[in-house]
Image (tube, rainbow, N blue to C red):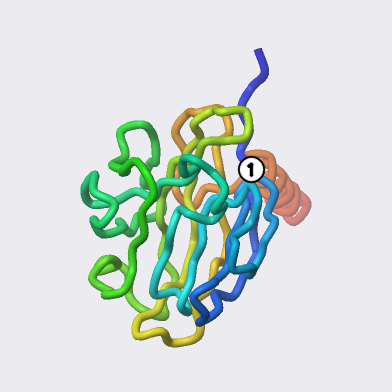
Amino acid sequence: MAQGAILWFPHQNIPIPTTFEGVSIDLETGDVSNAIGGLPGGDVNFLLGGTAVTNDADQTASTPSWQPVRTGTSNTDSLRQLGIGDTVDSNSTTSTGFGASGIPTSHFPEFTPGTPGHLGFSLTLQDNTTAYGWMRVTLQENNQPGGVIHSWAIQDDGTAIVVGVPEPSSLLLFLLGFGSLLLRRRR
């Protein structure tokens, strides 16, 4: 049996256009599109400068692949802002079916406009595995420019993911390098 991996997309800094088309993203590949018809294989679409988000990024799909963590199970319930160290897993509250959040901005009350925050999500991968992930985003209000999708990570085997934790191998390399530097300095 293959071991799961974290798919990590750091430093993306994808601007969210103020248009209704927004920006659609395939979270498994990092492909991005600003086309009105979405993106084949797309998962999430942020639009109107970061004042709205929808899971209808692939308009030919019969079911959505992406569901954000919300305060309740309705597609109109607010998105939750998660903190570093929070866990996203099968116990996280999501909805089903197609839905959008945004205008009015009450769908993002836990987010401070213009300030980066983290949201969690479940994602149906291309192999039909349900995976969990987090995304660092800056949302806006009143259709102001400046919304940004900074980065995201997905635990691809269906197990829980901790918000803000990078790929384990990158973290391990950093710690090994830092430890080597400390040892060298002691000598």
Q: Name the residue: 58% across, 35% down.
A: 125
Image x and y of residue 55, in percent: 45, 53
Q: Quadrant of residue 61?
A: top right
The answer to whether any part of residue 178 appears in the image is yes
Relative placement, left or right, of 184 versus 132 is right
Instruction: Work out which quarter of the rendered image holds the N terminus and state it.
Output: top right
Amino acid found under the numbered disc labelled 1: Leu
Dot 1: what SS? Answer: strand
Residue depicted at 59% across the width and 68% down the height: 36
Residue at (48, 79) in percent of width and height: 49
Question: Does residue 13 appear in the picture of this structure?
Answer: no
The correct choice, above or below, for 44 with respect to 92 in the image is: below
Residue at 39 percent of width and 41 percent of height: 88
Q: Residue furthest top?
A: 1
Q: Position of residue 104 (x, y in %)?
A: 26, 75
Residue 24 location (% of width, % of height): 58, 61
Q: Where does residue 185 sit, x and y in percent of width and height?
A: 74, 56
Residue holding disc 1: 7
Residue situated in front as seen by the camera: 18 or 2: 18
Examine the rendered structure and indicate whether residue 10 appears above or below residue 183: below
